[in-house]
Amino acid sequence: MEFNVKFWGVRGTFPCPSPSHLAYGGNTSCLEVRVGGKVLVLDAGTGLRSLGKRFLKDGVRDATLLLTHAHWDHINGFPFFEPGYRPDFRLRIMARDLKGCDCIGQVLSTCMESPLFPVPLTTMRAEMSFENLHTGDQLDLAPGVTVKTASLNHPGGAVGYRIEHGGKAFCYVTDTEHIPGQRDENILALIEGADLVVYDASYTEEEFATRRGWGHSTWNEGVALAKEAGAKQLCLFHHDPDHDDAFMAGLEREARREFAGTFAAREGTTLNMLDLAAEAA
């Protein structure tokens, strides 16, 4: 059995290619999950470019891309995904139904039209399919590989994912805003008893107070949710561009004092879900 998660992009909002962000990483949201013989990609931020190069090196020719939503920082790596230009590559792209659009393919096509981008989507020669999913759907992507979904509180909507395989559960819950004093029941149900939860911890409590309605959360809320749901480990994710390495290290230490199983996502880290061992790639 195989159930590995690799972080190719951990930053939120905007990529940060600067020396002060090297330890945790500057690319925007993109995870790779190799599970039960399938290759899944969670979001298509700028980290997708490097992932595409790894696919070519490893000979990967088939993948499923699960998008949380279509905001820029979660799709801006897509036009630079090299396997997408190869006719021998197959990509299944799934996203929630988007208001005003037939499917995610329409969004990606628009983003690559002039004057926004010089190369249209039709230049990508890979075999691609675009599918709508509805929050609450369960996807059976392979024997023994189940993906559950839940709605998140984000402007325009977003999807949280729970991937189950081999008796382990990995949850990806980013771009969601909590309501102070209330626990999100959708999230609690999704992450119940999970082995690892990746959670949107963009802001400190002080920052959150001035950014209500922006669609993001705090490490404090992540810890509270993980404890209440009985999750084993919590991974802080979607780091704010203003949070450099020194800031992130302090934030990580503070969060770990509240919940020992907490750590901050680092670009390039691989997690083996079957033994929960983490090692730098």
Image (spheres, rainbow, N blue to C red):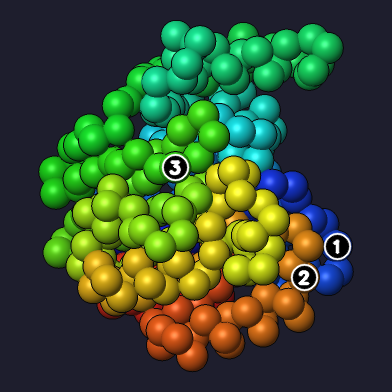
Between 170 and 156, the one nearer to me in the picture: 156
Q: Where is residue 233 in the image (x, y as percent from the top left)?
A: 36, 75
Residue beneath label 3, please?
153
- SS for tag 3? loop
Identify the mark at residue 244; answer none if there is no mark: 2
Which mark is on residue 18? 1
Amino acid type, label 1: Ser
| Amino acid type at mark 3 | Asn
Q: Specify which label sits upstream in the sequence, 2 or 3.
A: 3
The structure residue drawn at horizontal position 65% and vertical position 13%, both measured from the top left corner, is 110
Q: How far apart are marks 2 and 3 (CA)?
A: 26 Å
Identify the residue shown where x is 15% and y is 64%: 167
Q: Is mark 1 on a helix, strand or loop?
A: loop
Residue extending farthest to the front is 181
User: Callout 1: 10 Å neighbours few (<14), some, many (20+)?
Assistant: few
Q: In this view, does 211 lie above or below 220?
A: above
Residue 179 occupies quadrant: bottom left
Element carrying mark 2? loop
Say which amino acid is labelled 2.
Asp
Where residue 16 appears, as percent x and y from the top left, is 79, 56
Quadrant (top left/top right/bottom left/bottom right) for the C terminus = bottom right
**Residue 257 x %, y %:** 49, 90
